Image (cartoon, rainbow, N blue to C red):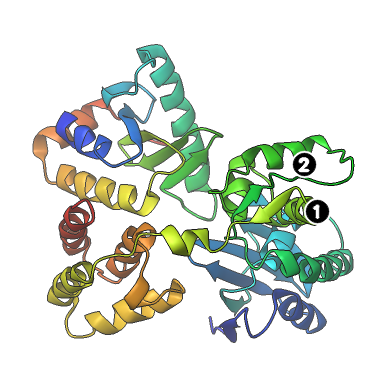
Amino acid sequence: MKNGLLEINQVLGVWGSVLCSNRGELIESVPPTGFNKTTLEDIGRKAVDLLSSAEKSVTGSTEAVIHYSERKMFLVDLKQAILIVFCTPSVDIPLLRMTVNVITTRWQSDKKVQRRLENAAVDRI
Amino acid sequence: MAEVLRGNLAQLSLLDILKMLSAGNRSGRLDIHQGAKSGEIYLQYGNLVHAVSGTHLGEQVVYTLMGWLEGDFSFTPDVEAPEQSISVSTEQILLEAARQADQWRDIKEVLSSTDTVFNISASGSTNTVSLKPIEWQVLAQINGERSVIEIADLLDLHEFDVAKIIYGLTTAGLLYEVTDSKNAFREIVDESFFEQLLVNFTEVIGPIGPIIVEDEIKLLGEDRGAFPQSKAAELVERVSLEISDSAKRAQFQKQMVAVLRG
């Protein structure tokens, strides 16, 4: 799982990536420097709320990009977990999205990863 | 659900399309695409009730979409709006849009597209210039590299508002257009990229592969002979969406991510 996050971090413009449960609890991370566990879990909870709202809306979104003046956050809903990628504004989003898709597809057939995700997940209402 | 109207904004402006749909009391969703960007406008019995583009909602989205001079549109009738984000009357919006369209015509005299890049003039203005806070914020982002659209994204402002400010600053002599900076310095992908893209894509999707790739290049407004590196991943992602089998799509993306990352 950590290797997958490290691969994501190799995309130009990515600072760090974090995998949180759908309650916002940290599962695995290769975070950007300066972010402690509490901050990451706080971000994780907010990401869960945002993606849940987007999913319930008509768009049925499973991803979101949040733009800040000096950074971007790319969020992906993996159902059992939320992937949060911290990036610079110039990151190539299509390249990042494809890299994430390659890795999450690989995770889908990795029983060890699936077990960790299932253990961390709670049923969504 | 039949799609009754489809075309290109270069041939029919968004203002004309909305006037037509409004006059016909049509209900449905108008989708607009420009490269990777998209927007939706919903009508109910000819009235504009909801507009969305990215994270933006409401009538300002309609004005922003009016600024897209190129792109594709399609109207799907009888699609209900998921919410109501437009509170002002359709007449008011169309009047304001017509006023902004006139302003766009002036703006386009100094700003050919929202991809244009400006820099701060060393000679400056011959007169005293006073700037509003928002004008100063835009001016502070101009560095000879950022395009109008990039500045709008960075400041979370609408393209039209940024274009209007840049137009004002340029006519005041504070800015000048950086001639074709993107084209002059943009990196072009190597022909070997296309060779690998076509081999990998055709292998998974069959002989229609090259036709899909050519179509997507055109939809991105580019030419295979001078295709920018900055859009290479977007092209790969777009063609990959034609692969319906998710495992095969991921495998294709894996091969192409390796190519893109050299």
Labelled pair 2, 1 in contact (Cβ < 8 Å): yes
Q: State which quadrant residue A87 falls in.
A: top left
Q: Nearer the viewer, residue B109 or B23?
A: B109
Image mark for residue B135 = 2
Residue B200: horizontal and vertical position, in percent?
15, 70
Left or right, residue B87 beside residue A125: right
Q: Chain of mark 1?
A: B
A29 relative to A11, above or below: above
| Label 2: which secondary element | helix
Give the residue displayed 37% in from the left and 75% down from the top.
Answer: B217
Depth check: A102 or B75 in front? A102
Q: CA distance from mark 2 to mark 1?
A: 9 Å
**Would you identify the image quadrant in which residue B241 lies?**
bottom left
User: What is the x, y in percent for residue B162?
Assistant: 71, 51
Q: Secondary structure at mark 1?
A: helix
Could you tell me the amino acid type at mark 2?
A: Glu
In the picture, measured across the screen, residue B54 lies left or right of residue B139, that is left
The amino acid marked with disc number 1 is Gly
Residue A59 versus residue A27 in the image, above or below: below
Q: Residues within 10 Å of mark 1 (few under 14, many from 20)?
A: some
Left or right of B94 on screen, residue B114: left
Residue shown at the point (47%, 47%) measured from the top left:
A55
What's the residue at 18%, 53% (across, down)?
B262
- Callout 2: residue from which chain? B
The disc at residue B168 is: 1
Task: Specify the quadrant of the image occupied by residue B206.
Answer: bottom left
- Residue B159: x and y in percent read 67, 55
- Residue at (36% x, 69% y) in the render: B227
